[in-house]
Image (cartoon, helix red, strand yellow):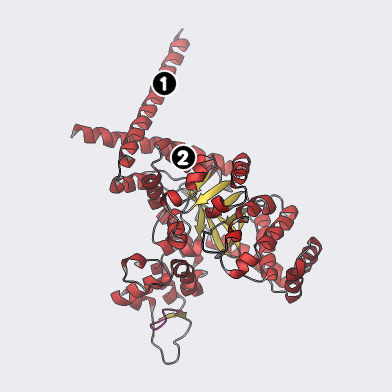
Amino acid sequence: MQKKIAALMVGLALASSVAHAASNEDITKRYFASLVAGAEPKRAELTLFMTMLPKGGDLHHHYSGALYAEQYLDWVDKQGYCVDKASYQIATHAPDGAACVSGASVMHDNGMLAALLQRWSDKDFYNHGALQSPPDRQFFDTFGYFGPVSATNAHDGLERLKQRAIQENLGYIETIYQLSPMQQDDAFDKQAYAGLSDAQMEAYLAKLDQNADFKKGIASYIGDLKEASAGIDDAQFSMRYQGFVLRFLSPSLVFSSMLSSFEMAMQSPQIVGVNIVGQESVAVSMHDYAMQMRMFKFLKTKYPQVNLALHAGELALGTVPPEGLTFHIRDAVEVAGAKRIGHGIDIAHETDALAIMKEMRDKDIAVEINLTSNQFILGIEGQNHPVTLYRKYGVPFVIATDDAGVSRNNLSEEYVLFASRYKPDYAEVKKLSYNSVKYSFLSADDKKRMLKALDVKFALFEGNIAKSEKSALNH
């Protein structure tokens, strides 16, 4: 009898705990609904809410573009470089006849710092105080400015990203890290443009497999990453990495960097995927797109376990001729075998778009939504953004930052934009946080661990929101 009574008491306690947790969630739902209700969402309160919100992961994240320019100025001095006052380019020595100053000097010169930030990021672009280049050029040109130091001091960079993530309750970053090793081969380039075949790719793969320098580059990349990431993972935070390919390079460089990316993903548990990056609308990117997807397909048959998250469809009407908008997402899914799509902006223009979205829904292929960069680079926002289509047709998606340092934002702000523009309910926002773990390339065990951690974090978060709301009512 005593055991039955004890069991009953435990059951009642558990039921009470569940009911209490449920009431906290209900209060949080009602509070969130009040923030997005009406014509003008409560942006300040939404910012506080989204900063506190547990966010599982950021799955579309460029390491070099995530770091703020101020970090790069610090590295300019650590590397013994300087900033050319005329061009704002980093120089390894003082150019003849030009003034070249330290990063610290830039930081302490308000006028020069403001001018540098207008070149090294998107800051001030819309306030008419900046140099008014076209927004897509402004965005992509920034990488050329800080490029000389973006691959240096990697541990410092990863540590800074980790601390910022923890500050906004983000538990995981899957970053597109650094350009994968590659080799130029003029003969392969000539063959590729004449009509690339599997036999030609097989022969080039065999050639690269016998290239000692190529193999050394792969080993060096893995070793450097291991050293740079030491101590980054802990109970609060984890980071994984993607090797990447630049889509506007020659076919031999693209194929060899794809191959090294696949190899590294097989050799290192830290490298969980392969990506292709670079402005999709430039001539080489458009001309070579179908060929590059066939390269991915070929290598995917050699390395079936390797995950692909491909930038695809980062295009809008007018950026390229209309026919260029009709196949990029489809080829990334059906030819290359992508498990996630980065951006996916041109979906409404793709041939048989409804069938593609159904396929993505059925295969559980998620889209990485980057609201800030889509607005800045392509002018796509609000009801013109295809996140409205993905929501309507059940295609899974996640909210991500893209290049937070260039855009001068963070993941919390991306959630604020999503909430204020599309008025989701709290359940959808919460699901997006869990989706960013579900659709990550983490191992099954790591996913399970992180999802459990999210359960705990959300219970605490909802408890704090409920407590705050009850306190506000009493006042």
- Considering the whole magenta stretch, tell me its main secondary structure: loop
Going by the image, does 355 lie left or right of 131? right
- Please, what secondary structure does the residue beneath circle 1 have? helix
Is residue 85 inside the magenta stretch? Answer: yes
Residue beneath disc 1:
15
Going by the image, does 197 lie left or right of 396? right
Q: What residue lies at 74% left-to-right and 53% top-to-bottom?
A: 301
Amino acid at pointer 2: Leu
Is residue 475 inside the magenta stretch? Answer: no
Label 2 crowd bin: few (<14), some (14–19), many (20+), radius 10 Å: some
- Front residue of 39/272: it is 39
Going by the image, does 434 lie left or right of 328? left
* Residue 447 in view of the camera: yes
The picture places residue 182, in percent across and down from the top left corner, at: 66, 69
- Front residue of 419/217: it is 419
* Residue 180 in view of the camera: no
Look at the numbered discs 1 and 2 and tell me whether their residues touch, using CB distance below 8 Å. no
The picture places residue 265, in percent across and down from the top left corner, at: 65, 56
Amino acid at pointer 1: Ala
Q: Quadrant of residue 194?
A: bottom right
Quadrant where the C terminus is found in the figure: top left
CA distance separating discs 1 and 2:
21 Å
The picture places residue 343, in percent across and down from the top left corner, at: 52, 54
Q: What residue lies at 75% left-to-right and 55% top-to-bottom?
A: 302
**Residue 361 position (above or below residue 281):** above
Start-end of magenta stretch: 84-89
The picture places residue 124, in percent across and down from the top left corner, at: 34, 67
Q: What residue lies at 68% left-to-right and 55% top-to-bottom?
A: 266
Q: Residue 454 carries which label?
A: 2
Label 1 crowd bin: few (<14), some (14–19), many (20+), radius 10 Å: few
- Please, what secondary structure does the residue beneath circle 2 have? helix
Q: Quadrant of residue 25?
A: top left
